[in-house]
Amino acid sequence: MYFTGLLIGLFSFLIIGLFHPVVIKCEYYFSEKIWPTFLFVGLAALGGSLFIGSTFFSALLSILGFTCLWSIGELKEQKERVRKGWFPANPARKKRTDCKKAEHTNIL
């Protein structure tokens, strides 16, 4: 019996499941402006998967890469979820934007 397909499916499930809280935390702490990191890691993982001889590890790395790329869109959707009140906003970030607005009003 060959378990490679089952293991790839299991690890796909785990990688995708792991990225759900990663996207939430990244949006909370860094805002959606962290998307270039996901782009770089995703493209690097996809590029790396082209040079790995093992089908199993190449597949896992490409799954990681595509999950990173998919997360870019999820970051933007997470911003909307926060705006709608479905997830908490980072109060420290809101204070920073309020301070910037206050600085601009004091200058005028």
Image: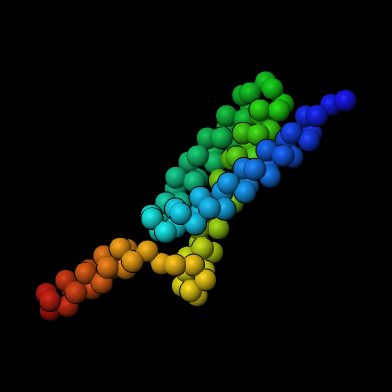
In front of the other: 99 or 40? 99
Where residue 44 sits: x, y (%)? 52, 35
Horizontal side of residue 2 vs 42, given as left or right: right
Which residue is at a point 44% across and 53% down the rendered structure image?
26
In front of the other: 23 or 61? 23
Is residue 93 depicted above or below 37 in this figure?
A: below
Is residue 80 depicted above or below 42 in this figure?
A: below
> Residue 90's quadrant in the figure?
bottom left
The number of discs equals 0
Is residue 30 depicted above or below 52 in this figure?
A: below
> Which residue is outermost to the top?
53
Where residue 105 sits: x, y (%)? 17, 78
In front of the other: 50 or 11? 11
Instruction: For residue 80, say whether it is visible.
Output: no
Is residue 74 depicted above or below 105 in this figure?
A: above
Horizontal side of residue 39 vs 34, given as left or right: right
Which residue is at a point 32% across and 63% down the rendered structure image?
93
> Residue 47's quadrant in the figure?
top right
Where residue 39 sits: x, y (%)? 50, 45
Which residue is at a point 84% across and 26% down the rendered structure image?
2
Where residue 6 sits: x, y (%)? 78, 35
> Which residue is outermost to the right?
1
Quadrant of the frame with the C terminus:
bottom left
Instruction: For residue 94, say whether it is visible.
Output: yes
Colouring chosen for the image of the structure: rainbow
Which residue is at a point 60% across and 39% down the rendered structure image?
64
In front of the other: 24 or 54? 24
